[in-house]
Image (cartoon, grey):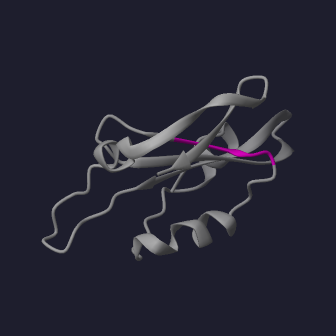
Amino acid sequence: MTFLDDYHKKHNYPLFYESYLQNIMEFLESQDIKNGADAFVDDHQNLVFVLYGQGYRAEGKEGILTTQVTVKAYDEDNKPINFANLLDSLIVSEYQMEPNLWEVSHD
């Protein structure tokens, strides 16, 4: 877990957690996600969540607590899981719920 906003990046070290993959949603829900979250697969095929928390004012500047959680998972043989391949079966629906928002479902 890495802080991306200027204030928290300057005052905190990256944090590393080890857990089971099925616990990721519980972990994300325990973080400050007041202003939403984004998810994507990075260049190393890891699953990445960027969490947007509450606004703050520090050192004369305003910001939003922004945290990046990078999920690196391994199979039973300790080989890295390629999330790009794993999530390839996700289907983006053909209709929009609101402008620029897509519903994602799994078959």
Image location (x, y in percent) of residue 70: 44, 52
x 81%, y 39%: residue:
59
The number of callouts visible is 0
In the image, which residues are magenta?
Answer: 35-39
Q: Measured along the vertical axis of the image, is residue 73 above or below residue 26?
A: above
Looking at this view, is 90 or 30 the one in front?
A: 90
Dividing the picture into quadrants, the one containing residue 7 is top right
x 68%, y 69%: residue:
30
Looking at this view, is 16 or 33 the one in front?
A: 33
Looking at this view, is 48 or 60 the one in front?
A: 48
Magenta span: chief secondary structure: strand
Image location (x, y in percent) of residue 96: 72, 28
Dividing the picture into quadrants, the one containing residue 104 is top right
* Residue 107 among those drawn in magenta: no
x 12%, y 71%: residue:
77
Q: Measured along the vertical axis of the image, is residue 71 above or below residue 78?
A: above
Left/right of residue 102 with respect to residue 35 in the rendered view: left
Dividing the picture into quadrants, the one containing residue 21 is bottom left
Residue at the top extreme of this rendering: 99
Image location (x, y in percent) of residue 40: 48, 39
Residue at the left extreme of this rendering: 77
x 68%, y 66%: residue:
29
* Residue 38 among those drawn in magenta: yes
Left/right of residue 85 with respect to residue 103 in the rendered view: left
Image location (x, y in percent) of residue 87: 39, 47
Left/right of residue 58 with respect to residue 17 in the rendered view: right
